[in-house]
């Protein structure tokens, strides 16, 4: 088996963004060897399941892996201990580093590379991104994502994400995370699929493209047949005729916070998984019935003071509520602008915390008009996010006008 000494690899003056990208993406230790790897499986999306094209493309793929890595040491995987790997690049661990030490050295080498600090090094950055995602990535045509499995269940996974956001300047709205081991099949052991980092597929196709060789014509045909998107070839790059995606804001930061505090390193029971699924709206039934976003409700509930935005300047929460078992005063989360069935209003900026008395008083017909408007005014004065949100929805900064419109929308 061919291998490169780890000490030689770390001391190379050449930056080798492709190899750094694939090692940063995934590696496995086996005895004194460190493997990075790539899968290359026959796809159901290739027309007629042409195995001859597939087998021929594997040879081309291996050649191009070596070309783009600049160190031609990729080879067929013959180690049965290294599963789910068709091709491997191997380092000999002559420094006797642990997995954590190896990651730290690779991470440091990347951060010190010119292509990270030099924003004009676009080609090198694209090589790094391609190697990170494509050598083990898969296309999710149902949700328009290019997906990348997470295996390690530790803080290094969060560092992998932050590199793209903090050092590459990629928009947070390109990313999403899927907690696969919240799936019932994972807990039962029927199918233990992994957590995934996901990147917007149409952005990826239009901005990164597919290079002939490490994602070659065979892979390009998979995307073409699955998504019905044609491609054209410029030199050795396959580019796709797809428009730039419309990217909506997502709750990626909140998902990461949820992952690190509620899921990471926790031994979850079936009951706990069910509760987490409900909080994340991972419902098995795909009905179109509106359901409140429990995730943002919990952010307001647990990360803001236990006080009522409508009456805190008049009453002490002690006199309007009671202590719960978690030693927090019971409060209720209220949509300042009533949502009805409009999901677009179910956002963090539209939520406010109320004592149960004020919350009940703000139901339509539950209190006098003057009293309800007084409570609405107090919330506007107290909660700047609610004021800005209502101003945007009703296109006015005038508080009297906003009070009237919020009052008219009470449910």
Image (cartoon, rainbow, N blue to C red):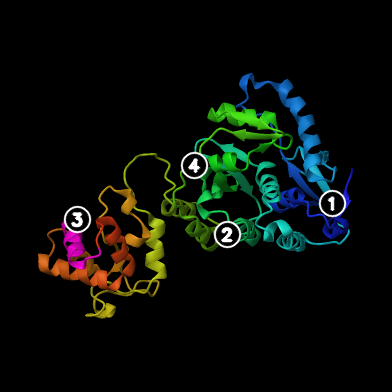
Q: Does the magenta stretch include residue 32?
A: no
Q: Nearer the viewer, mark 4 or mark 1?
A: 4
Which circle's residue, 3 or 1, is located before the other in the chain? 1
Which circle's residue, 4 or 3, is located before the other in the chain? 4
Which circle's residue, 1 or 2, is located before the other in the chain? 1
Region rendered in magenta: 397-411
Horizontal and vertical percent position of residue 12: 85, 57
Residue position for label 2: 264
Horizontal arrangement in the rendering, residue 388 relative to residue 163 (left or right): left
For the C terminus, the quadrant is bottom left
Q: Nearer the viewer, mark 4 or mark 2?
A: 4
Q: Residue 83 carries which label?
A: none
Label 4 residue SS: loop
Mark 1 surroundings within 10 Å by alpha-carbon count, few (fewer than 14), some (14 through 19), many (20 or more): many
Judging depth in this view, the residue of 128 and 350 nearest the camera is 128
Residue position for label 4: 245
Q: Residue furthest top?
A: 48
Instruction: Check the image and report above or below for 17 versus 401.
Output: above
Q: Residue 91 carries which label?
A: 1
Q: Nearer the viewer, mark 1 or mark 2?
A: 1
Q: In which quarter of the image is residue 312?
A: bottom left
Q: Which of marks 4 and 3 is in front?
A: 4
Horizontal arrangement in the rendering, residue 158 relative to residue 87 (left or right): left
Q: Which mark is residue 409?
A: 3
Disc 2 to disc 3, C-alpha distance:
41 Å
Q: Nearer the viewer, mark 2 or mark 3?
A: 3
């Amino acid at each position: 088996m061919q291998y490169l000494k780890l000490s030689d690899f770390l001391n190379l003056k050449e930056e080798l963004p492709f190899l750094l990208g694939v090692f940063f993406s995934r590696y496995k230790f086996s005895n004194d060897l460190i493997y990075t790897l790539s899968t290359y499986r026959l796809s159901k999306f290739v027309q007629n399941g042409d195995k001859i094209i597939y087998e021929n493309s594997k040879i081309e793929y291996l050649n191009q892996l070596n070309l783009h890595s600049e160190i031609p040491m990729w080879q067929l995987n013959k180690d049965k201990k290294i599963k789910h790997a068709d091709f491997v690049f191997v380092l000999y661990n002559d420094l006797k580093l642990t997995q954590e030490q190896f990651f730290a050295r690779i991470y440091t080498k990347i951060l010190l590379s010119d292509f990270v600090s030099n924003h004009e090094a676009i080609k090198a950055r694209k090589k790094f991104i391609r190697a990170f995602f494509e050598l083990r990535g898969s296309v999710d045509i149902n949700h328009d994502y290019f997906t990348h499995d997470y295996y390690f269940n530790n803080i290094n996974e969060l560092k992998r994400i932050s590199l793209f956001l903090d050092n590459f300047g990629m928009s947070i709205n390109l990313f999403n995370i899927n907690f696969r081991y919240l799936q019932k099949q994972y807990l039962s052991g029927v199918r233990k699929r992994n957590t995934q980092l996901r990147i917007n597929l149409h952005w990826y196709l239009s901005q990164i493209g597919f290079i002939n060789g490490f994602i070659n014509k065979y892979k390009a045909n998979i995307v073409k047949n699955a998504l019905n998107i044609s491609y054209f070839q410029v030199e050795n790059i396959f580019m796709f005729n797809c428009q730039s995606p419309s990217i909506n804001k997502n709750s990626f930061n909140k998902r990461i916070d949820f992952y690190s505090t509620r899921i990471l390193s926790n031994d979850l029971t079936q009951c706990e998984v069910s509760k987490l699924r409900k909080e994340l709206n991972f419902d098995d039934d795909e009905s179109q019935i509106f359901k409140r976003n429990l995730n943002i409700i919990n952010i307001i509930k647990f990360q803001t003071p236990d006080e009522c935005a409508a009456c805190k300047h008049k009453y002490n929460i002690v006199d309007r509520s009671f202590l719960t078992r978690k030693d927090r005063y019971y409060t209720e989360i209220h949509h300042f602008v009533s949502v009805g069935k409009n999901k677009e209003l179910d956002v963090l900026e539209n939520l406010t915390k109320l004592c149960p008395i004020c919350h009940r008083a703000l139901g339509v017909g539950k209190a006098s008009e003057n009293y309800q408007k007084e409570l609405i005014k107090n919330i506007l004065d107290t909660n700047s996010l609610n004021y800005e949100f209502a101003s945007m929805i009703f296109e006015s900064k005038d508080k009297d006008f906003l009070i009237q419109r919020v009052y008219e929308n009470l449910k």
